[in-house]
Image: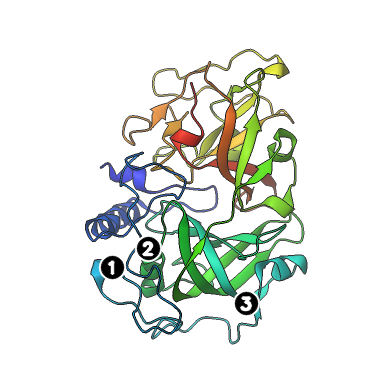
Amino acid sequence: MDFFLFERLSTRDRPTFANVVFGAIALLGVVACGASDASPDSAAGAGGAAQAAGGASAGLAPGSGGGSAGLGGAPSSGCGAPTPGVVGVCTAYPTTSIATMRAAPASGCFELSHVGLVARTDSPTEPRIYVQDQNGGDTSAILAKCSPTAAHACAPSVKAKVAALLDTPTDGARISVRGYYQYGTVGGFEEFYIEDIIDECAAITRPAPIALTLAEVTKDARTRAKWFQRADLQIPTADPLVMFDFSPPDLALVAGQCPNFAGFAMIPQSAGLAAPAGCAGTANPAARPADPREVLVGRQFFNQFLFSADCACSGVTRQRLVSPTGSVSGSLRGYLILEEDKGSTATYQVFEAAADQTFPIH
């Protein structure tokens, strides 16, 4: 596998070349030991590793003492217990549900109690997990980030737990997550920084996908109640999404270190716009003027969703370069999130496609 493929880079986070290499080596170790790092919505063999069960924790009740399977098959720190030796920045973690926390909303330290793992992204150096209250509903999910360099840092032993959590196409681990909830009062950006994870050694059946409309997923919309949930976007065959921009400025990364873009933009065919310019060799075309009807398509699940408009990097990362006339319709699976530009409060919605099979561009 090309190690360049292993790191999805957002506009806020770009590790060094050495970190990507280290992360690739770490991920190869995880794959060799049988831990799954695949999206729950991908089919076996799509973009890499097949979906194996994420360890031996399935079916164990909290307190059973069985311990969930960790890296290399070794027991973790124990069911229902904090990670030994991990001391977070927060001095206390009031227990709460995700919906209650997000209803406030105010930044602070919390323990998200008895939530379910809905999805795990493909990054081995800074993994993100989508977690949700077991009863579902509006504002019931959040994106939690295991960052080694943030003020509320995630220790290596906690990162190892993330990689070992139960993650199959239908089930996810039941966990409690301790850390810091960041809420941006200006742009409304939300994110949870993981300080520790308590594996309850039990499984939850993932909630059914919610329904999203095209109006709810445009980049300038703000569909906060449905953010971070597994969702299906229905696009009619009579009016498919077509390619709009190979080089959307919102998804541009630092040039010269693959990938250069974290995704691309599509728009309804009924917008009546001409197809965009494609690649000029390895150079991306100039960005098109923003359009309120455009949908930003992200590549957080890059091992499952291989479609890309990154002209310089598609070869080295085994991406599948899209055509300027590419289109997609039907039921499209993904996760709607809000992103924020690094160094500013500018925000925009991104639909993170789950897999090639559930976002098949033709």
Q: In the figure, 264 relative to 24: above or below?
A: above
SS for tag 3? Answer: strand
Q: Are marks 1 and 2 in contact (CB under 8 Å)?
A: yes
Q: In the figure, 110 relative to 164: above or below?
A: below
Q: Quadrant of the N terminus?
A: top left
* Residue placed under numbered mark 3 in the picture: 110
**Residue 312 can be seen, yes or no:** no
Q: Residues within 10 Å of mark 1 (few under 14, many from 20)?
A: many
Mark with earlier residue (1, 2)? 1
Question: For the residues marked 1 and 2, what is the alpha-carbon distance in whole angstroms?
Answer: 8 Å
Q: Amino acid at mark 3?
A: Phe
Q: Position of residue 23 (x, y in %)?
A: 32, 56
* Residue placed under numbered mark 2 in the picture: 163
Q: Which residue is at 77% across, 57% downward?
A: 186
Q: In the figure, 103 relative to 214: above or below?
A: below
**Disc sitting over residue 343 in the figure:** none
* Residue placed under numbered mark 1 in the picture: 71
Q: Which residue is at 45% across, 20% downward?
A: 279
Q: In the figure, 129 relative to 267: above or below?
A: below
Q: Position of residue 51 (x, y in %)?
A: 35, 50
**Residue 139 can be seen, yes or no:** yes
Q: Amino acid at mark 1?
A: Leu
Q: Residues within 10 Å of mark 3 (few under 14, many from 20)?
A: many
